[in-house]
Image (cartoon, coloured by chain):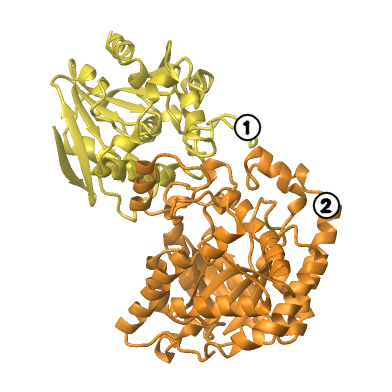
């Protein structure tokens, strides 16, 4: 069930499912896609709370809200409002960037951090392209880089209702607003990753060519208590492409 | 009616390669630009602009980046040269893509400098810029129009303020001592122009009394001009032809065949212009949500931009196709005059024609004849077609 919560002037759409230890899920740049199976799988063992980022879904995007910093504070506020305790903070792709920005600020509501093919840092030099330029390639090429099996990514937009398409378009615009320049990262974030003081798990699609497992390894090395697990037959969205294997990996983190 | 000659200063020697690779812009490596040929072409194009002054035409310059379609990368640089080589022509910058410029105060300085240099002949276009200009500038498309309006307001304030310095702490731009030197001859600012394709732009331009220009399709121009006139009326003033401009490709010749041949060569501008690698044609946020929803609903259509009616691939259109959409006026001087006269009536009266008179393969000799024949045989008749009277109300001008 989705509901809307007002936080700091943002009307935030929240998808909530399941019971158990809380899990705050921050979605990818592509959007939440709550009809996909991973939220239900996670909800078998967790109380899953999944907001649509400002600008996505039915969440509002006020003019003043311009950066990923703002999103980090917004979701820290959300965690306070929901009085989360020992929660799992999980973010995929763009959501992973937001989760990392939250974790370097304040982890008191969270017991562990899970980064799934996260964006947000840059390891290489000025002419290295750590993160594929998703906005300079045709959609087909993006899918080829982002999916182990591109056939699974097919979406027929011509058959979608206009309200849903409008939400997708607004989400694309929001993604660009937050991640255009510097491209999909915060140059200062990696210098603060040492502040993350909760166990951190990196789950990475083996075939991700948007941000490769090697990029994930750089993320892992910068966080003091971090482990990484690679998910086979998955690209940039392992929760989407291999939901069962992804859920198994999440379950095994608890042990 | 005033007529402004305009050429993009094309680098057509690279077009064949660009067409083969499917993009004349952004991703076509500049190994395809031969600097020696570029030297010859740039000087030739500037000669053609200078000729316009001698024959009584006004002059327009635009800019694009990272492209074989247009070598002008800086309107103020080109206009600085043209200002020195001309005496009478008014000089239209159409314009500076201000949402892609990091420093609006610098834009105000350059425009003021040009106005002083030219003796008050500058007309100042503040434009949004085409979608494929986002990548070369790497400006954020999602906040483009918010940046545009802040830059617009700051530039106008910088040019018209004489009691500075003033403070500007906005959403995107921050200055604590704005006080431009020189300041423009034309006070409070040179005439301001905008460009666009939508009725929304027509409405917003009317609210400021700016001249609004559009291009290449009568079907798009008419609703925009109507929106402008309607909004002005709502605000208590009547917008005359002087507020409205239209860009068209024009070829004139002593015979109809010669005029059509010239127009057909210039029309390669319209055929090459949309050939851009697909990801750069519609960056997120550049176009409004409903326009993007409509594009997704329609599925992918090649070489199509928001605003096209989608029925034609512009890259393959014939001269007659372009004439049917008012993209091209062509033929003898009488033909061209009567086409523009008819167009003007259908548009309800416009004050400016932006005359695309060179578009790549049209050589220097043909270009010179196109310019001189048009100026001698067509321009005098157009001058009396609509009045030049400035209808922008003083109340807006004082703001």
The residue positioned 19% from the left and 32% from the top of the image is A15
The residue where tag 1 is placed is A128
The residue positioned 46% from the left and 55% from the top of the image is B308
The chain painted orange is: B
In the displayed structure, A137 sits above or below B81; it is above
Depth order, front residue of B59/B12: B12
Please give the label number shown on residue B35: 2
In the displayed structure, B186 sits above or below B103; it is below
Depth order, front residue of B90/A71: B90
Taking B109 as reference, is B222 left or right? Answer: left
Taking A112 as reference, is B394 left or right? Answer: right
- Disc 2: host chain: B
The chain painted yellow is: A
User: Image quarter for residue B353?
Assistant: bottom right
Pick the quarter of the image with the N terminus of chain B: bottom right
List x then y, in percent, for residue A247.
Answer: 29, 14
Q: CA distance from mark 2 to mark 1?
A: 29 Å
Is residue A225 visible in the rendered image? The answer is no
């Amino acid at each position: 069930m989705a509901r809307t919560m007002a936080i700091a002037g943002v009307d935030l759409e929240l998808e909530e499912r399941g019971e158990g230890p809380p899990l705050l899920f921050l979605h990818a740049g592509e959007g939440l896609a709550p009809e996909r199976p991973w939220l239900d799988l996670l909800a078998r063992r967790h109380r899953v709370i999944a907001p649509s980022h400002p600008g996505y879904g039915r969440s509002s995007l006020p003019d003043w809200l311009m950066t990923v910093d703002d999103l980090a504070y917004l979701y820290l506020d959300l965690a306070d409002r929901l009085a989360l305790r020992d929660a799992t903070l999980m973010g995929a792709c763009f959501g992973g960037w937001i989760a990392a920005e939250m974790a370097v600020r304040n982890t008191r509501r969270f017991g562990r951090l899970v980064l799934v093919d996260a964006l947000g840092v840059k390891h290489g030099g000025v002419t290295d392209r750590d993160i594929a330029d998703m906005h300079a390639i045709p959609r087909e090429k993006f899918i080829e880089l982002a999916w182990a099996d591109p056939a699974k990514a097919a979406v027929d937009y011509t058959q979608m209702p206009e309200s849903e398409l409008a939400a997708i378009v607004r989400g694309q615009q929001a993604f660009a607003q937050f991640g255009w320049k510097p491209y999909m990262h915060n140059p200062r974030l990696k210098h603060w990753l040492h502040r993350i003081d909760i166990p951190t798990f990196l789950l990475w699609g083996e075939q991700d060519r948007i941000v490769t497992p090697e990029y994930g390894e750089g993320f892992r090395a910068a966080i003091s208590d971090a482990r990484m697990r690679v998910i086979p037959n998955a690209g940039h969205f392992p929760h989407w492409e291999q939901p069962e294997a992804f859920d198994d990996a999440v379950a095994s983190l608890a042990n | 009616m005033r007529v402004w000659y305009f050429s993009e200063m094309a680098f057509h020697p690279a077009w064949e390669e660009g067409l083969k690779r499917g993009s004349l812009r952004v991703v076509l490596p500049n190994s395809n630009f031969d600097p020696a040929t570029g030297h010859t072409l740039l000087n030739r194009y500037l000669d053609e602009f200078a000729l316009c002054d001698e024959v009584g035409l006004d002059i327009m310059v635009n800019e694009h980046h990272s492209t074989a379609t247009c070598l002008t990368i800086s309107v103020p640089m080109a206009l600085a040269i043209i200002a020195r080589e001309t005496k009478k022509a008014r000089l239209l910058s159409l314009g500076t893509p201000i949402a892609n410029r990091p420093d609006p105060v610098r834009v105000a300085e350059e425009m003021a400098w040009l106005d002083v240099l030219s003796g008050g002949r500058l007309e100042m276009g503040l434009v949004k810029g085409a979608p494929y200009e986002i990548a070369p500038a790497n400006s954020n498309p999602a906040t483009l129009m918010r940046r545009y309006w802040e830059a617009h307001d700051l530039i106008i304030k910088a040019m018209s303020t004489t009691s500075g310095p003033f403070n500007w702490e906005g959403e995107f731009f921050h200055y604590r001592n704005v006080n431009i030197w020189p300041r423009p001859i034309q006070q409070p600012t040179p005439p301001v122009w905008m460009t666009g394709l939508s009725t929304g732009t027509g409405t917003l331009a009317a609210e400021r009394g700016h001249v609004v220009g559009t291009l290449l399709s009568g079907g798009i121009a008419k609703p925009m001009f109507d929106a402008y006139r309607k909004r002005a009326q709502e605000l208590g003033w009547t917008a005359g032809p002087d507020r409205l401009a239209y860009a068209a490709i024009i070829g004139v010749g002593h015979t109809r065949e010669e005029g059509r041949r010239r127009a057909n060569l210039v029309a390669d501008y319209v055929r090459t212009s949309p050939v851009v690698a697909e990801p750069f044609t519609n960056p997120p946020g550049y176009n409004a949500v409903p326009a993007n929803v409509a594009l997704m609903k329609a599925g992918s259509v090649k070489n199509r931009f928001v605003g096209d009616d989608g029925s034609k691939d512009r890259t393959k259109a014939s001269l007659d196709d372009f004439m049917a959409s008012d993209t091209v006026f062509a033929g003898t001087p009488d033909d061209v005059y009567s086409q523009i006269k008819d167009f003007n009536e259908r548009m309800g009266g416009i004050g400016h024609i932006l005359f695309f008179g060179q578009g790549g393969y049209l050589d220097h000799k043909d270009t010179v004849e196109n310019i001189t024949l048009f100026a001698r045989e067509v321009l005098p008749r157009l001058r009396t077609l609509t009045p030049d009277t400035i209808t922008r109300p003083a109340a807006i001008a004082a703001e």
